[in-house]
Amino acid sequence: MTQGNFPWRRPLVQDWDEQLAEIERALAEGRAPEYVAVKALANQQLGMREQLRIERLAKKLSKAASPVAGFAEVTIGLLGNRTLSFLPDPLAAAGLARGLKISAIEAPYDSVASFAYSPADCFGRSLDAVLVVLDESAFASKRPMLDQAAEDEALADAENLATALAAAAQEKSGCKAIIATLPGAVQVSSAELATPGTSARFRHRVNLMLAEGAMKGQWLLWDQAALASRVGLETWLDPVRYHAAKIPFSVDVCPLAADSIASVLAAMKGKTARGLILDLDNTLWGGVIGDDGLAGIRLGQNSPEGEAFVAFQNFILSLRDRGVVLAVCSKNTDEIAREPFRNHNEMLIKEDHVAVFQANWNDKATNITSIAETLSLGLESFAFIDDNAAERERVRQELPLVSTIEVGDDPSFYIERIAQSGLFDHLPLNQEDIARAESYGGRAAAAEIRAKIGNYDDYLTSLDMRMEIEPFDDAGRSRITQLINKSNQFNLTTRRYGEEDVRKIEQDPDMMGWQVRLADKFAQHGMIGVVIVRKQETEWTIDTWLQSCRVLERGVEQCVMNMLFETAAKAGVKTIHSHYIPTDRNGMVADFYTRLGFPASKQQDDGSTSYSCEVADYEPHKNFIDVTLAG
């Protein structure tokens, strides 16, 4: 492995060894090292020596008496028809760079059929995911050359196996299967894809089948084929080790493969970037707008550099179409910085695409912090793009939680570096994801209105907010599951439920699940809350209460709580019970129930706090939202 495998990461710092030694010293003394220090150390252009040392560090961290707060824990099963024993250590190292503490459990060699079709469970425990890596030999059906019917039958067999594996992962391990696509085959002819029976055509059709299944929510994908294509099949596959040790891809590319898998796991755990912060001069266009003027900057204009900037802007807009919120952070005079957005014919990104526009002469770390506060997002939710190496390094030093991508200074490579970083990896998109960028833009506009109005009640009234509360249903299930498994800060119990669990809640008469949506005059915010209640005849217990941080301080929780008590009263309920289970990330809601009117609490032995409120004693909160309660 070489540093070139991770060109988007920070170049290796000179005192890397010293930083590692300090972290290891803390572990040896029984102290927990800082999350940001561990993550920053792993998230660099590691050479082979540094890679091995990070793998050893990950092992030490997994055994440490004092765990490092901040890492999302992930336990993943590895299942394949070839040897995967070389993956756990690189996966653990890759996880540290993405804010994950990954524990990988390998199934016995070639346990695929028994896991899929028999009662046997090779993992014997619940998991966060089962990664399935198969090669073509797992699909044994014969495919004679030019026999289309035989190929169709083989494809059907492959789909049946994938379906069985996904069902087994859900039933035995309580999780989703992540199924790897098949890397391309060595081709004899350019006509391979047009010839039934060839390996290249069959693999291509299997990959399309897997993509369709992922789109329908049957499983998740790790696109091994795309990664193998990126590095080249000759690099990806080691024929000697494949035949000698049954290794499906080269050990040399294992750190890169592990990082790619970790990016999928990061998407599952909500550890990917939600916002992209952009510099302007020589980042969105060539030249300096303050010096060169509108006619002097290079953008389009039939020049290679100008065309590269247009392509980059198109790419940025495609990220926004996926729900990524855009912000500008530029050392510039505001009016001058906005001129290309308003008046340049080749400028694709417009002002209304940008949620927060910070153009001034403050240092960029200060402006990025202001952007994060305006959007109510943590710094770890952002990626930062700047052509200037000195500015990148300054932001890394001041704000190490921000993912500063090493894009270089040639716009032709900006797209490649950002895409390969995996920072914007995501699960199959839904409409809620796509609307997120508009929602954040609406939040920034609302913050501006709030600053002008001053009076908080008048501000909330001015937003013209509309809320819809509906029972769990098929249409919302994917987003409900996503919120349950991603929300950490505004989450009272942080209980995790998979899609099948959510389906069962829908059907259970002793459970009530609410999905909460919000809109205002600026944006459709989509689903921003989930409430799950366990019902008994005269007593209800709030099992789960979580909200998106996109709509803080809007009176949402007060409004939902009013509706909950009103619904309980109509059902003849006398008491509502609730719990707060503290984590290292949900301290912001420690006083949630007392703030919403629940009387004195009771501390439990496990550190949680229990509350109870008589329905007759509840006093409704002031409400600024027009509510529709369905069902």
Image (cartoon, rainbow, N blue to C red):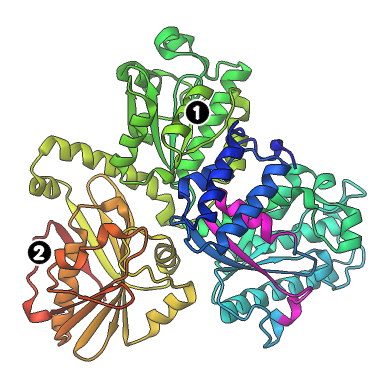
The amino acid type, in three-letter code, at marker 1 is Glu
The reply to whether the magenta stretch includes residue 91 is yes
Check disc 1 and report the residue beneath it. 393
Q: Which residue sits furthest front?
A: 29
252 in relation to 575, above or below: above
Q: What residue did someone put label 2 on? A: 621
Towards the viewer: 191 or 372: 372
Which element is circle 1 on?
A: helix
Q: Is residue 388 visible?
A: no
Q: Quadrant of the N terminus?
A: top right
Q: Is residue 119 above or below residue 524?
A: below
Which residue: 47% across, 24% down?
391
Residue 339 place in picture, x, y as percent: 36, 18
Q: Position of residue 114 (x, y in %)?
A: 73, 82
Please tell me which residue lies in front, 300 or 548.
Answer: 548
**Which segment is the magenta one?**
86-114
In the figure, is residue 269 to the left or right of 335? right
